[in-house]
Structures are given as structure tokens and as C-alpha cells.
Image (cartoon, grey):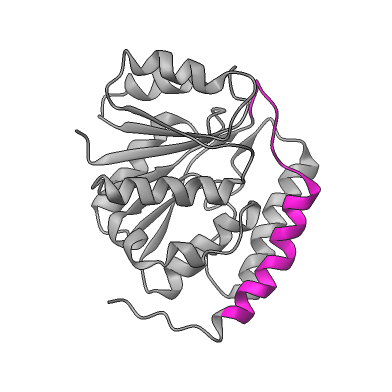
Amino acid sequence: MSDSLIIIPTYNEKENIEKIIRKVFNLNFTFEILIIDDGSPDGTSDIVKMLQKEYSGLHLEERTGKLGLGTAYIHGFKWALKNAYEYIFEMDADFSHNPEDLYKLYTACKNGAHVAIGSRYVNGVNVVNWPMSRVLMSYFASMYVRLITRIEIQDATAGFKCYKRIVLETIPLDKIKFVGYAFQIEMKFTAIKYGFKVVEVPIIFTDRTEGTSKMSTKIFREAFLGVIQMKIWSWFRKYDRK
């Protein structure tokens, strides 16, 4: 059993899921994978079940209905803690996050970080195949987060991360409020407020070539307004590590 678990939420990822699973299991480092599938009507979970016969480190949790990115990760975090993993990763199924970079995040946490972020912006702008409008929206969203929250994270909305177990044990996961784009911001902000060391590891982000993006105006609006709400809520919370 590996000490490292990669959580991959899925909804209609039949074009990518087998390729991403095989890629991870062909790396030179042993990771396990937990797929959280929200009832994909395209048969994503059936592909995972087929591959479970081949890979003992492949796990599947099926949920009914599209319940949101944040709730999928919270479900996965709790599963990871229950099953005693030490390093817990977030990664997309669509190859926008390069599995080859997983070991970079693992090494950063092994060497003292509590949270390692695969960052698109820590060394300039490292994004491939995104339209300029999307790049600008993402880049300025991170600037906006830094302005409101005062956290020094260049890629505040990044979704490629590694957590050490202690972080997820400390953060009250049931109190994380956001489910969409803002979830990624809230988790980073909360980890920093608890005094954990958060580092950014430079990566190159490549937009998906297959499948459909889950980004929407509603998700972006949640993030924009959520950052202000999150900052206000923080004034009335205590961040004491036990």
C-alpha cells in the first residue's frame, strides 16, 4: 500500500479516465488513485470498475448526481484520512495537470511543506492552449484573491495540490463552505490561517484536448463573491491547531 493517494473527481470523463489512470500507474513512483464519480451518464465509472481488475491501488466512490467539486474533494479527503494515507493529492482527469509533476509536489511536502501547489504563475505565466481571455481571467482572479485575503499565493485558484495528512486532520472539513471554484481558494486560505507552510511548485498547465470543461459563470461568480465572504468570516473564527 502506498502512503500517497490521488483524488480525481469525475463527471463525464470517459475520453480521459483510462488514459490518466494508466499514466499514473506507469510512473516510477507508487501512487494510489481514488476516483469520485458523480453519477456520470457517459459510463466513466464503468471504465474505472473495469480497470480495478488490473490495478489493486485503484479505488472508486460513486455518488448520485452532480454534487460539486468541493464536496467531491471533501468526500475524498475523509476517505483518505480513514484509510491512513499520509500524502493526499488533488488532480484533474483531463491531463491539464501533468501526472509527471506529482512527484514534484510529493517531494515538496516530504521536504517540509504542508501543502504543495502546482502553480501556473509562480514563474511567469505557464499555460498552454487557453484563450487569452481565460488566461487573463485566471491570472487576475489570483491577484484579486491576494488583494482581499492578503495571502501571498500567486496561483490562488490552482487545483493541483498535495496535502500532508495533518492539514486535513486540522481543518474542520465540514465547515468548508464553497463547492465550486472558490473551494480551491478557501482550502489554501484556511491552511495558511492555521499556520501551515504552503509552497508553490512551478508547473506547465495544458488545457484539456478531450471532454468538456466544467467551468461556468455561476462557478466564477461564487469565487468572486466568496473571497469577500471568506475574509469576513475569518474575522470571527479561531484558527487554533490542537
Q: Is residue 14 visible?
A: yes
Q: Which residues are magenta?
A: 208-233
Q: Name which residue lies at 38% across and 57% down.
A: 115
Magenta stretch: residue 221 in it? yes
Magenta stretch: residue 72 in it? no
53 or 124: which is nearer to us?
53
Picture quarter with the C terminus:
bottom left
| Quadrant hosting residue 235 | bottom right
Q: Position of residue 210 (x, y in %)?
A: 65, 20
Q: Residue furthest bottom?
A: 236
Vertical placement of residue 182 versus 52, above or below: below
| Quadrant hosting residue 42 | top right
Q: Is residue 156 visible?
A: no
Q: Name which residue lies at 42% across and 45% down.
A: 76
Q: Position of residue 109 (x, y in %)?
A: 30, 52
Q: Position of residue 186 (x, y in %)?
A: 55, 63
Q: Residue furthest front?
A: 64
Q: Name which residue lies at 36% across and 53% down.
A: 163
Q: Name which residue lies at 52% across and 45% down.
A: 72
Taking 135 as reference, is 21 left or right? left
Q: Main secondary structure of the magenta part?
A: helix
Vertical placement of residue 98 versus 203, above or below: above
Picture quarter with the N terminus:
top left
Vertical placement of residue 90 versus 146, above or below: above
| Quadrant hosting residue 107 | top left
Q: Position of residue 39 (x, y in %)?
A: 59, 30
143 or 95: which is nearer to us?
95
